Amino acid sequence: MTQQATQEGLSTPTSGYDPSTSIIEIDHVTKSFGSFTAVDDANFSIAQGEFFSMLGPSGCGKTTTLRMIAGFEQPTSGAIRLDGTDVSRVPPNKRDVNTVFQQYALFPHMNVFDNVAFGPRSRKASKDEIAKRVPELLEIVRLADFANRRPSQLSGGQQQRVALARALVNLPKALLLDEPLGALDLKLRHAMQFELKRIQREVGITFVYVTHDQEEALTMSDRIAVMSDGRVEQIGTPTEIYDNPASVFVAGFIGQANLWPGTVTGRSGETADIVALGGASLKGRCQSEALRSGTDAVLMVRPERITISTNDPGPTIQRVRGTVVDLTFQGPIVRLVLHTSDDTPIIANIDPDHDLPMLRPGDNVWASWSTNAASVLPASPDHPLTATDVVDEG
Amino acid sequence: MTTVSAPVKSRRFSKKEADDSGVFARRWFTPYLLIAPGTLWLLIFFIIPLFSLGRLSLKSGGLSNYSTVISDNSTVIVRTFVYASIATIAAIIIGYPLAYVIANKGGRFKNLLLALVVLPFFVTYLVRTLSWKILLFDGGPVVNILHSVGVLNEGQGILGSPFAVVAALTYNFLPFMVLPIYVSLEKMDRRLLEAAADLYSSPARAFRRVTLPLSLPGLFAGTLLTFIPAAGDFVNSELLGSERTVMIGNIIEKNFGKEFFRPELSALSFMLMAIILVGVIIYARILGTEELA
């Protein structure tokens, strides 16, 4: 699953948006509830027409940020601008954004048509306009035959689409989606991911999407903001975030990652030398200014970027010697666990076509990867590495 | 057969197993057994007396008993329903905001506030109503204050007036209005109001289009629970009213004591029931509560 997401993630971005025209600006926004800081100095902007995701574990502040954009919460400090206008203190009913709620929050006493017509009626749209626009939207979400049903007579996926139509009918400047697929089962979720992308392309409205599901974010987004403990850890395209994570947290949260502690021994431009994995001298890409010779760091390599060979692949490539500990067949891939001389685990995902002699536990092999595949990240006191989470399932 | 002989201690049966073994098989008469006590109770203490009352109301004069009763008591009948209606409306006006505040702003005091609403019920109905007499008598604290403020003229009192009766009716049945409304407001999903605000509704419009419709079942139940007993009540008028405030209940109560089996009284009781029933049906039609259930 993760593997598949990775490949799809690499093929994004898909929709054309113009990064130079920002529709939402989050300007140094902090939100505190009592002594608890839910969002800590968030500072980014979202472009017109963009599919923007906020991704992170529960409690990371992504929903609070979304609720501040919607107007349900007010920032403790900082400003939120919508299309250039400061809306930080504007109530939700006077903001030109609409929300798709986590549990949909459809009006149970109204049928599908009236639910969708709720927004236009609030804005005193004419009867003719409502009679024209509501069926149009129901057509887009493929619920044209369900206009007279009550929400309770619809399946979860159908309710989801009503919620979407109810928000989109207003043609807001941005659509805010709070874990909209969280309540659906896996199969439906995949179908709806596709649907959401289709609809977003069709209507061309900015989507701000909150999720804790990294696969969902990678698959759908133009850009992702990865959040943790109220802070934005990294913002970038799915490819950037996957290939070039800015922190140990991002590397571990998105996809699988080998994370090995080590010490920086040298630095030249965007490449750092690091000693890790039982004294091996290795190289990796490095963007953090703080990493200099002598500082503690973490070396990150994705399991699928590692090649296994029985012969020494030579010094032109990053390589370590290890002993096979475990082999697991996982369908599309074989998962191989090696231990280096100091018992640091290396996990490699190998596709079954890989030309390799029969490996058994106890065999000595070389694990190698290109310098490009390795990142040297700052060691993080918030996310100390332990033996068990060296590879995070995400 | 293995099912029967197998050790079944603390083992859970699947539905299929249960059907096969017959242990939990549904028997056709189980539902009837369950409703039997209630049915029997209603039959003996409600249906049969009602039936004999109905038969009695047609004795000696037949249907003309009804026309006699209506023409003799037209003022009282109208007054009864006017009083009950005003008391019900007043209970809505007082009770709805009360229930709304407790449900939405009560926070951790919710249960305490609800207990306060129900608290008067720990005192008998009769004593509660009698205590109003102490409050409202001429020369009592309430009347004195109203005199000094100038709301009442010298010599005017409250006791014996329609106001006293209707106010006491409102007071006595208020909790029956508050509790059902509270329940329907309490179970309402707060996010619906966020959704309404998100869809450009002002708080007033969100109340009108979302909160109010969703609390209609509670409002409906509260109205019935207030209006029906208020229309049949005699205690409030008896204790706080006068000849000017006689209600149907008073006539029935007064005369039933003396001449137990008078057909006209039975007819009057049936009238009361019939009018309430028709009123409730019309009301239910207007509010359309089946759809909301």
Image (cartoon, grey):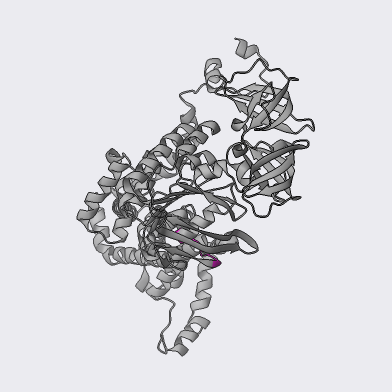
Q: Is residue A364 magenta?
A: no
- Spot occupied by residue B120 in the image (x, y as percentages of width and height): 55, 64
Tell me if residue B63 can be seen: no
Report x, y in % for residue B97.
Answer: 45, 66
User: Quadrant of the rendered structure where residue B195 is?
Assistant: bottom left
Q: Tell me which corner region of the image, top left, top right, bottom left or bottom right, holds residue A345.
A: top right
Task: In this rendered view, identify the residue nearer to me: B151 or A198.
Answer: A198
> For this view, does A138 lie left or right of residue B129?
left
Query: Quick one: which residue is furthest to the top in this view?
Result: B1
Residue at the spot x=27%, y=40% of the render? Answer: A144
Residue A287's x, y, as percent?
Answer: 61, 50
Res A362 quadrant in image: top right
**Chief secondary structure of the magenta portion:** loop
Residue visible at 64% across and 60% down in the picture: A36
- For the view shown, which residue lies furthest in the right direction? A342
**Which residue sits at x=27%, y=49%?**
A134
In the foreground, A9 or A195? A9
Total marks placed: 0
Tell me, yes or no, if residue B164 can be seen here. yes
| A390 w.r.t. B228: above or below | above
Q: Is residue B123 left or right of residue A158?
A: right
Image coordinates of residue B119 in percent, x first then y, are: 57, 63
Residue B216 versus residue B82 in the image, above or below: above
- Magenta residues span A70-77
Q: Nearer the viewer, residue B79 or A233?
A: A233
Quadrant including the N terminus of chain B: top right
Answer above or below: position of A79 versus A287. Answer: below
Is residue B4 found left or right of A225 in the rendered image?
right
| Nearer to me, B254 or A384 | A384
Would residue A74 be counted in the magenta stretch?
Answer: yes
